[in-house]
Amino acid sequence: MGLTVEENMKLKTDTVKKIIMVVDDDPIIRTIICSIIKRSRPGIDLIECENGEEAYNKMNEGIDLIFTDNNMPKVSGLEFIRKIKADEEYLNIPVVMVSVEDRDEYKFIGKELGVAGWVVKPFQNNQISEYINRFI
Amino acid sequence: MNILSFCKNLNYQKYIEFEVVQVYEDIISDINISSKNFHAILVDDFKTIKLIIDNISKNEKFSIPVIMLLKSNATYVDFRYSIDSGATDFSVEPYKDLKEIIVRSYMRLDELSDSSEAKLNQLRRTLINSIPHELNTPLTSIIGLASVMAKEDVPDAEGYKEFCINIYNSAKRLQKVIDNFTYYSYLQLKLSSNSDVSFARSFTVSNPEQVIKLVIHDLQYTYHREIKFSVSAGSIQFNATNFYKLVYYLLENALKFSKNDSLVMVGAYPLEKEYQLVIYNEDSGFDPDQLNYIGALIQFDRGINEQQGIGMGIAIVLSLLKLYDGRIKIISEKKKFTKMEVFLKNNINNQVVYIDGTNSRRKYEIKN
């Protein structure tokens, strides 16, 4: 007996490889976030970028979730988000800001730009994995 | 809306004396805005406001209100951008509150007419903004790596070792930020007291060449790099510990911002009334704008695209030079070289601070 339409859809969704992008100019922070992601979703594809410019150039690789820092050289996290939210193709990709910035005005800007979540550094592992569970 | 015609239609002369001058964007960087004696500057785009703020900063005048005129559909982001760009205030179309904003800004800036006070405020603001970032970044690494290790996510012994090294390096980075900030605060306290400044200037380092050689030795070891040097004996108005730090920060900058195989040289020579320290490095270098920022102590104004450290090293160097009445001259060409020339006052005094270079390298003594 064949699979139902719903089962087929679910199977298709499950088998499509998900990709998470991690953007931070500090390689240690990238290592930490990637380790948390790997533990939460073994085998998931990861793309690491050093700044918003490099990240934007890799957006066409089919990203499903983005964790980005704000304070980065060349293109900051908020600038990067502003660029992808202005692009219809990437508009709906959830972006989580991971930043030492805890001031309300920055969070307000993030909210206006459509940031899906805001994790303040230093963070707990489960803060990252909660967003993975929510969006992946 | 044309700003010029808008302003001309308003009878500002009744309110405050107001001169309307049109400045074209392409010549903003070539003119001395401060010398024009403007009462206020109105701007309607972010690129121009940045050019104007840079121009005013270069001329070390902070007493001209620069007001951003925003369109009626402006958002909170635009308000923030206006202030982050350096605008004194902003007004939204149809600019009904513009008169009040100009007067309010003018009065506020008038209180800060002393440019040194304005610089200090700029520095304070930047430090307050930067310190949490500088402290939390290494702290995040330490907590994060330790947390990952605790959950046994490290694959093998090599990975485990790498994590340990990263924790160690992050802790050292954190320690350095704390040390620098503590030292910087200590210097600011000293500078705020005339008696402390006088007392500091009563000390003499009778063998600065030994201190310089000690710094070279220490940094050669840390950076595994050869540093060429030619230093002569002298006597300077300084304290040995502080002089060590001055040379350390300058030379460390030269090493940090140059390629491993590029030339770094140190020279030190007595002049008639001063002692000259020269630190030269190939590579890196500053463009003229960046040089102005260093001189004006506003290199800490971290733009949204530039987030590379706190610049505490140069702030400490400038504070030390202020404390000991020294001066610095920076000659540089972008991507070619940087030459830092430091001039320190000679001083012969009863109190002599020296370093015993033979038996106990780090022992500082005071002779009466």
Image (cartoon, coloured by chain):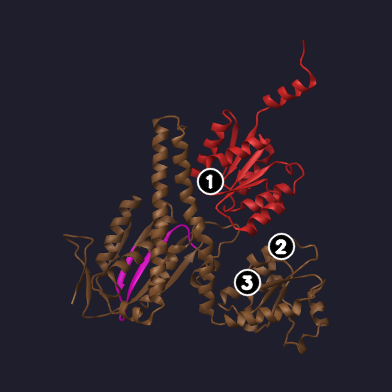
Chain colours: A red, B brown
The residue under label 2 is: B78
B272 within the magenta span: yes
- Which mark lies nearer to you, 1 or 2? 1
- How far is the residue under mark 1 from the one under mark 2? 30 Å
- Which mark lies nearer to you, 2 or 3? 2
Q: Which stretch did the figure color magenta?
A: B266-285
In the image, taking residue A97 as reference, residue B314 lies left or right, namely left
Magenta stretch: helix, strand or loop mostly: strand
In the rendered structure, the residue with mark 2 lies on which chain? Answer: B
Q: Secondary structure at mark 1?
A: loop
The residue under label 3 is: B53
For the residues labelled 3 and 1, say whether their Cβ atoms are less than 8 Å apart.
Answer: no
- How far is the residue under mark 3 from the one under mark 1? 37 Å
* Displayed quadrant of residue B51: bottom right
Residue at horizontal 81 percent and vertical 82 percent from the top: B10
Disc marking residue A123: 1
Rendered position, B116 above or below A102: below
- Which mark lies nearer to you, 3 or 1? 1
Q: Residue type at mark 3?
A: Ile
